Amino acid sequence: MATIAVENYLKHVLLLSEGGDDLVSMGELAAALAVVPGTATTMVKALATEGLVSHRPRYGVRLTAEGRRVALGVLRRHRIIETFLVEVLKMDWTEVHAEAELLEHAISDTVLDRLDALLGHPATDPHGDPIPTRLGKLDSQVYATLATCGIDKPLRIVRVTEQSGEFLQFAEQHGLRPGAKARVTERNLAASLLTLKMDRDRTVTLSLSAAGHILVAPVK
Amino acid sequence: MATIAVENYLKHVLLLSEGGDDLVSMGELAAALAVVPGTATTMVKALATEGLVSHRPRYGVRLTAEGRRVALGVLRRHRIIETFLVEVLKMDWTEVHAEAELLEHAISDTVLDRLDALLGHPATDPHGDPIPTRLGKLDSQVYATLATCGIDKPLRIVRVTEQSGEFLQFAEQHGLRPGAKARVTERNLAASLLTLKMDRDRTVTLSLSAAGHILVAPVK
DNA sequence: GTTTCTATTTTGATTAGTCAAAATAAATCT
DNA sequence: AGATTTATTTTGACTAATCAAAATAGAAAC
Ligand SMILES: [Mn+2]
Ligand SMILES: [Mn+2]
Ligand SMILES: [Mn+2]
Ligand SMILES: [Mn+2]
């Protein structure tokens, strides 16, 4: 049985290898897990002897097929729980991440399947994050972000990839939630800022780095 | 923050001191937690220095006011979760105990309150076990059991105090669930057996020790 | 009132996970 | 190429929780 710590390490290796290179560095991993680098090294070596990751010392770590299977299970639980908390318990989509962070380790397959059915087998969670299927398929569609998309094209926000409460509350405040319509009106590389028009002609200004966490698709 | 182990120790001290004497012995406690006696001693000494229990060496352990507060919180979470699993997820009342055993340590006050509201602030869980209130009040009404009640009186089963899957499945099989009507027709002390009549004139025979786990109230 | 039994406690070890700080290897700069 | 910077690994130590087995203290039996 994977411990809570093991599940967290594997999940974070998966998340960090998603949007980036193949090997996850110890630095990134340690930062994501809020441990010192030496701790991450020690744990990764243990995971490697368990066959859950392969470790290229001094360069980084990558999931094995088995490690990926476990990580996808954790991620599926996390995202289904988040969806449940928002859809059934009517919690705010800006606050469910921390809850799911604990519950993802405590829920059985039976309960997970029932939640999934109750929710109608959702494809994405409240942040627009794709939910891995029971069989371990994870949608990897690539979207543009508000930082990279075209100017003046009509857009729909599909995903917000940043879990911190402050960021999500900022997004919510300005209507930047999955499903919302938006249009980039101006992008200023020098100032690293951009302006967008939302519904009802609401104007929002945000930094390029924040914009990079908001994924969008062209409308129609 | 109380760890999972600490929560489990406190909860079991509470449960064992409910139906019995005041002091819980190390033997009972160790058995309930499935650890060796020495482990229970070590942990109890640690809990005592934390002010959560008072330990009378060689005699037993009892909760302090603070320990009781924590234990009631765990018990409330456990029983609300069980109720949720049965009422909302339609799981079987014979299988939810093990699930709740883990989830009780992973759920926040926010989620707990939402579940409680969703369920309509239930007073008892699917086994008839009373749910401690938010303020830490635990109904301590004393009921007769099938082993101690009068013969030929009409009864209603109010509670089944034994969490093992086998026992509960046996109970379910014979209609011995909370709310069911029953009447003891015969009790044989020598053979340590008793017979009862259920709805539809169904006859059930069970041992006195099993009967002691089924609490009943007189009907009207 | 000793002896015997039994539950409890103590002792010594182990595992999982972590940090602080020293050692080292790779990359970068001159 | 040699020196410097930076990330990673190693080492040594610690906490929480556990077990096996020896020591001990009450209770019960004689
Ligand atoms: Mn987690
Ligand atoms: Mn999410
Ligand atoms: Mn538990
Ligand atoms: Mn119960």
Image (cartoon, coloured by chain):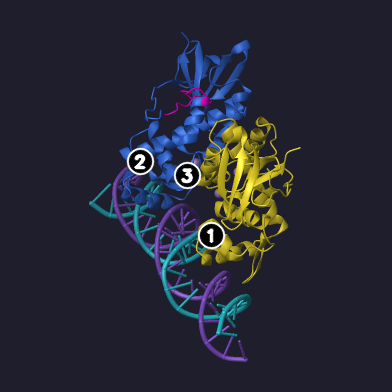
Chain colours: A yellow, B blue, C cyan, D purple
Tag 2 residue: B67
Quadrant of the image containing the C terminus of chain A:
top right
Residue at the location (36% across, 48% down)? B47
Q: Chain of mark 1?
A: A
Mark 1 vs mark 3: tell me if same chain.
no
Q: Chain of mark 3?
A: B
Q: Secondary structure at mark 2?
A: helix
Q: Secondary structure at mark 3?
A: helix
Mark 3 Cα shell of 10 Å, populated few (<14), some (14-19), many (≥20): some
N-terminal of the pair, mark 2 or mark 3, is 3
Cα distance in 3D space between marks 2 and 3: 17 Å
User: Amino acid type of disc 1?
Assistant: Ala
Cα distance in 3D space between marks 1 and 3: 36 Å
Residue at the location (49% across, 28% down)? B116
**Magenta range:** B118-132
Tag 3 residue: B33
Tell me if residue B123 is in the magenta stretch. Answer: yes
In the depicted structure, whether residue A133 falls above or below residue A5 = above
- Asked if residue B100 can be seen in this view, the reply is yes
In the depicted structure, whether residue B202 falls above or below residue C11 = above
Cα distance in 3D space between marks 2 and 1: 36 Å
User: Amino acid type of disc 3?
Assistant: Leu
Mark 2 vs mark 3: tell me if same chain.
yes
Tag 1 residue: A31
Q: Where is residue A8 shown, x and y percent of the image? A: 58, 53
